[in-house]
Image: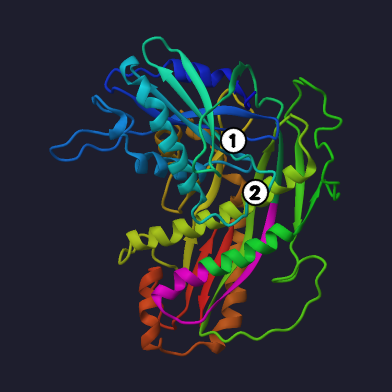
Amino acid sequence: MGRSYIVDELVEKYLVNLKTIDASYITGLLIGQFSPQKDFVVLAARTPPKEKEAGGSSSDGGGMVSSLDDIDVQWVSEHAKQVSHMLPGSLAVLGVFLVHPPELSKEAQNSLRRLIFAVDKRLSKGRLWKLTEDDVPERVMLQICSKTRKAICRTFDVQDPKSSAKPADWKYQAGVSASWQVLQCSVDLDVLFPMAETSSSNLDKCTKDGLQRWANQIETSICLINGKRLPDHFDVTAGQKKNSKAAQSKLQAQILIPTVGLKADQRSTASVQACKGFLTMKGVMHCRAYIHSNKPRACQAVEAIKRDLMNTVSCRTEMLFEDLFMNEGSSDRGAVSGQQPLPQRVFAPVPGTGFCICDYMFPDESLVDVSERFKEMLDCDILEETIDTTQEAALKQSNIVDNSEECTDNITSEMPTEAPENQRSLQTYVGVAVATGVALLATAASLLYLSD
């Protein structure tokens, strides 16, 4: 017997309402939570259509074609990557679906196989955390006939490139996420990234290397849940009433990070590293993860909140550099007193479910922008007034003031009065022109400093 998938009835309604009127097929993502015995599917999102090119036709979410070979695999994979940024801890892209006409049914399985492996490859790229033996390797594919509405569910092992399709059990159930507990914490960051060279090309590499070293610390850190270090196999739902209609249970986590580069049982030793500059990320970030009700172990909850922390730091850093590249030379993202904001994390409840999705707002963006992205990426109608911007907003002012003052005190005496020639390309890269050669990158929830 293959894997079992417990699917929220809201997903069933969504899939039933997808009509291939203007397209011969529709692709999309299946979103939910893994567990050792069975997985939970709580959201489905069709692939947004590509903009029409001059003289061409629109592509995926569909197109009037006679073959599935025209599915834009790269477009679907990029959609999965963007969606993964909107998912809090423990929620993930579990697989893909395809709605197709009867005459294309023979091609559907091969097309879905291509999509599953391409999506997994895209999601794995740049990931800071390492897979463990407990991670589920199977990804689900759902094949739906647009005429009969018959659905076929199968899985592929993405760790085996030669794997064949295995049958899976697809069961609908009401309120799948209603009893999920939420684990949340705020984490203080003070991460130093040494730079061997002060060049634009080196900045990206040093940032990635520094983030990976920091992520290794997070993976070996100690995590307390409600102030206690729980045994790995402890059931975190113990004491929770089954099928309770009470308010969602909230758990508080605390991540205790060891000394740089050390595991909890290692001794500290001094080291010297030659560098021409450094990046520093300081501040507080809000993290959260949702815990399924299928006898979740404490080690799974700890892993989920740690991965959410690593994901949100990586995502914001990536978004910052992308944004600076796109707005290079523009004053829209210009620094004030040497500061460049990173995006702030905001949350919004998905109607009819027990969990929230998230997004990232730059200071010049509005809730309208966030709501539109939710609609485009997740096909969810999220009201602007339901978007929670308070989780990190309370930290914004104190972080910018305190850390800016600290940075000014520590840096000004060490900075040359004129930026060296080899550093000016670096300033262009980050999109901040500062006479002293210092680029200060700040966020509502974190501060990123660039100095030499």
Q: Residue at x 63, y 17 (%)?
A: 173
x, y percent for residue 17: 42, 16
Residue 207 visible in the shown view: yes
Q: Amino acid at mark 1?
A: Cys
x, y percent for residue 431: 38, 68
Disc 2 or 1, which lies upstream in sequence? 2
In the picture of the structure, the residue carrying the numbered disc 2 is 287
Task: In the displayed orientation, state which residue is furthest to the left.
Answer: 55
Q: Residue at x 33, y 24 (%)?
A: 25
Residue 46 visible in the shown view: no
Q: Residue at x 46, y 45 (%)?
A: 81
Q: Is residue 255 left or right of residue 381?
A: right
Mark 1 Cα-neighbour bin, 10 Å: few <14, some 14–19, many ≥20: many
In the displayed structure, would residue 280 be above or below residue 292? below
Task: In the displayed orientation, state which residue is furthest to the top.
Answer: 148
Q: Is residue 46 left or right of residue 231?
A: left
x, y percent for residue 114: 41, 37
Q: Secondary structure at mark 1?
A: strand
Q: Which residues are magenta?
A: 186-207
In the displayed structure, would residue 278 be above or below residue 131? below
Label 2 and label 1: CA atoms lie apart by 12 Å
Q: Is residue 187 left or right of residue 385?
A: right
In the picture of the structure, the residue carrying the numbered disc 1 is 356
Q: Is residue 434 left or right of residue 409?
A: left
In the displayed structure, would residue 442 be above or below residue 112? below
In the displayed structure, would residue 124 be above or below residue 325? above
Q: Amino acid at mark 2?
A: Cys
Q: Secondary structure at mark 2?
A: strand
Task: Determine contact: label 2, label 1, CB under 8 Å.
Answer: no
The N terminus appears in which quarter of the rendering?
top right
Quadrant of res 429? bottom left
